[in-house]
Amino acid sequence: MDKRKVIYYQDELKDEFSTAVIEPKKIDGSYVYDRHGFFRSVSRFFWYRIIATPIAFIYAKLVLHQRSVGKEKLKPFRKQGFYIFGNHTQDIGDPFTPNVFGFPKTVSFIVHANNVSMPVLGRINPSLGAVPLPDNMEAYRNFLNCIKGRIERGDMLVIYPEAHIWPYYTKIRNFPDDSFGYPAKSGTPVFCFVNTYQKRGNLKKPAMVTYIDGPFYPDMELPLVKRRKKLRDEVYETMCNRAENSDVEVIKYIRKEDAEVGAEAE
């Protein structure tokens, strides 16, 4: 568990509080999003189902003490691809928990380039579903083809719209509607999940309770910009309501301006 007690922030849209320091590589037109072939399929199955899936369940249950509420909402979509948006509060847990509540569905993640830039894990993470954001237009076309293919094959495509990790944060940060453009264009169904932190009796470490909601559908009668915003607002409101179920604050987040005003008042 993160040992920090207080974190001071300045910009909830841009501040990053993950303890990992990684130099991201450039995702350009030469980056291959999907490698095909027999050996690639065997490699993905090995890393994803034989290695990562059991670890995800063990970590979620024994370390995070995680349980899911509402995962039955996903059952009618077992053979259909969809997008799911969640809050970003764990560096290790966030890649694991969707694989737990989404099982047996195959899960893909839209991620920062950091996730494919690490010396060892960077080579494995694509087999675990990592789809890095592109850095130029040539890569962007490949990226769009990739996520379209993942949806068509029936994946659960996870997006963390807050973008930056705030460990154990118990509210939902304001986030833009950019990433909602993917389902808004295609009419693909959308779900959301919120990881909350709740007391476990007198124990110090809280339990993670994950709430799953949806489906939400883009209003295809609206222009794309309004369609995207409406979809984002519906998901955001639902996530904010679910976040109220947190009843313990492991790390206190204080805006720097507020701290400075308080110090001056003293």
Image (cartoon, rainbow, N blue to C red):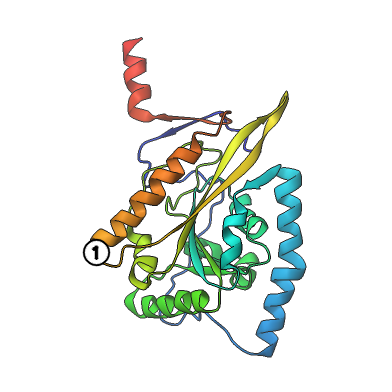
Image coordinates of residue 59 in percent, x first then y, are 72, 50
The residue identified by callout 1 is 222
User: Residue 239 falls in which quadrant of the image?
Assistant: top left
- Give the residue drawn at x 70%, y 87%: 39
> In the image, 85: left or right of 168?
left
In this view, 188 is above or below 258: below
| Between 155 and 216, the one nearer to me in the picture | 216
In this view, 56 is above or below 36: above
User: Residue 203 falls in which quadrant of the image?
Assistant: top right
Q: Is residue 117 visible?
A: no
- Give the residue drawn at x 34%, y 66%: 184
User: Residue 100 falls in which quadrant of the image?
Assistant: bottom right
Q: How many marks?
A: 1
Image coordinates of residue 215 in percent, x first then y, are 47, 58
> The residue under label 1 is which amino acid type?
Leu
Q: Is residue 149 visible?
A: yes
Q: Around disc 1, counting alpha carbons within 10 Å, would you say few (fewer than 14), some (14 to 19), or many (20 or more)?
A: few
> In the image, 178: left or right of 8?
left
Quadrant where the C terminus sits is top left
- Secondary structure of the residue carrying tag 1 is loop
- Give the residue drawn at x 77%, y 69%: 50
In this view, 80 is above or below 158: below
> In the image, 121: left or right of 173?
right
